[in-house]
Amino acid sequence: MVSRAREGGRRGSPPMKLKRALVLLTFNEIEALEKLFDKIPRNAADEFFAVDGGSQDGTVEYLESKDVKVLGQPRRGRGCAFSVALDVTDAEVLCYYSPDGNEDPADITKLFEKLEAGGYDLVVASRMMKGAHNEEDEQAIPLRKWVNQAFTLMANLVWNRGPYVTDTINGFRAVRADSLRRCECRVDGFVIEYLMSIRMMKLGLRIGEIPTYESPRLGGQSTAHSWPTGVEFTKQFLKEVLMGRQVT
């Protein structure tokens, strides 16, 4: 059943303002934070807090000096951080943002507004759609981009019954809390976003996208190593295939 908020967004009436939470996902991001923090639209959300994976470079201290509440994780992993945020907030919609330089903070407000105005359950900042930019676009062989597009194609072919989703993997996204809880995404690692997208498709929930410009990292080191991450994506995809349209 479609909620009244979703109906209002779909039919062109003024969208219902939802309680918003903006969640920073951090792990040793002090270099980027010092350059980006003032560009983050804190006032776009009703709640603003960080979930940190055990930073040792001053990230936590920097955020606390800016009056940002920082929550720790019981386990390492991006998926664990997603769950921590979902468990502690009573917001109706969450936007997950990694302040590492890849993601444009100007898109945070756009994600919230697209979700509310369009009645979506999930809105992804796509690096693949028309008008977007992927970090590898200038490379002769954009291998990571191609692999991401392949995983996205597989998810669309198997489960999607709505408009084609061009980027099922990017973690820069806004999602309705109740819809995310329905997805039962109990994973700790980098597969969290792909799994979330797949299960949204399985449940027939509405996914929207906005074009985004992915820039190079501003310091720090990525912990999403291509080969092991690709293996985890493949294993999760096959597990979801065996589960059919179920999510648990």
Image: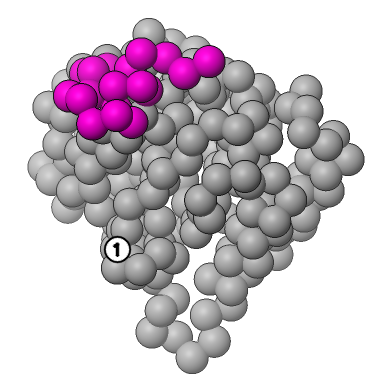
Q: Position of residue 46 (x, y in %)?
A: 21, 17
Residue at 32% in and 58% down? 211
Say which amino acid is labelled 1: Tyr
**Count of numbered badges drawn on the protein:** 1
Vertical order, 58 against 134 (above or below): above
Residue 244 seen by the camera:
yes
Q: Quadrant of residue 228?
A: bottom right
Residue 219 at x, y percent in the picture: 33, 60
**Residue 135 picture location, percent across and down:** 39, 71
- Taking the spot 54% from the left edge, 87% from the top edge, the residue there is 141
Q: What residue did someone put label 1 on?
A: 213
Residue at point 64% right, 29% down? 203
Q: Is residue 158 left or right of residue 11?
A: right
* Residue 11 in magenta stretch: yes
The verdict on residue 104 being magenta is no
Instruction: Compare residues 217 and 143 and report the one nearer the observer.
Output: 143
Q: Say if 59 sits above or below 92 in the image.
A: below
Left or right of 100? Residue 181 is right
Q: Is residue 238 above or below residue 72?
A: below
Q: Residues within 10 Å of mark 1 (few under 14, many from 20)?
A: some
Q: Nearer the viewer, residue 229 or 7?
A: 7
Q: Which residues are magenta?
A: 1-18
Screen quadrant of the C terminus: top right
Residue 202, given in percent of the width and then of the height, sits at: 68, 35
Q: Residue at x 45, y 86 (%)?
A: 139
